[in-house]
Image: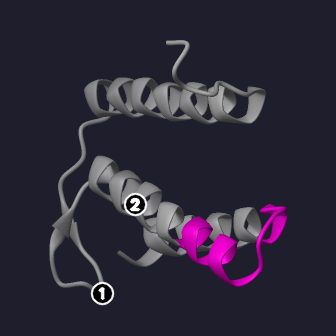
Amino acid sequence: MAWMAWTAPTALSFVIIAALLVIFTILAIRYPETPRVGILRIETTRGDRLFISLLGSAFICLAWLAIFGAPLWGALIACLIYAVAVFRWV
């Protein structure tokens, strides 16, 4: 993997996403969930909301880079607020 520039923040991001996937898998096995309908009017589970949060967070970070540039601390705060909103209302 020498072609990829692995930095500590990049590796940490992948480790956190992998940990989230493991945690959500364990939660799905231990506490099965029935899908719920939120403001998007589609049935979503915890995993669906996690995917929507991660995908939206990627776009938030890209938009932040395009508008403000580095560092991404403001984007991180916006992503956390977005994820909380997705898990609450979607």
Residue 30's tag is: none
The residue shown at (68%, 29%) is 12
Q: Is residue 84 visible?
A: no
- In the image, 33: left or right of 76? left
Q: Find the magenta span and give its range.
A: 60-74
In the picture shown, does residue 44 fall above or below 21?
A: below
Q: Main secondary structure of the magenta part?
A: helix
Judging by the rendered image, the residue that carries numbered circle 2 is: 55
The residue shown at (63%, 77%) is 66
Quadrant housing the C terminus: bottom left
Classify 10 Å Cα crowding around label 1: few (below 14), some (14-19), many (20 and above): few
In the picture shown, does residue 50 fall above or below 37?
A: above
Based on the picture, tell me whether residue 61 belongs to the magenta stretch.
yes
Nearer the viewer's eye, disc 2 or disc 1?
A: 2
Classify 10 Å Cα crowding around label 2: few (below 14), some (14-19), many (20 and above): few
Q: Secondary structure at mark 2?
A: helix
Q: Quadrant of residue 22?
A: top left
* Residue type, label 1: Ile
* Residue type, label 2: Leu
The residue shown at (72%, 62%) is 76
Q: Position of residue 80 (x, y in %)?
A: 66, 64
In the picture shown, does residue 63 fall above or below 14?
A: below
Q: Position of residue 51 (x, y in %)?
A: 34, 53
Judging by the rendered image, the residue that carries numbered circle 1 is: 39
Based on the picture, tell me whether residue 62 belongs to the magenta stretch.
yes
- In the image, 50: left or right of 85? left
Could you tell me how many numbered marks the image carries?
2
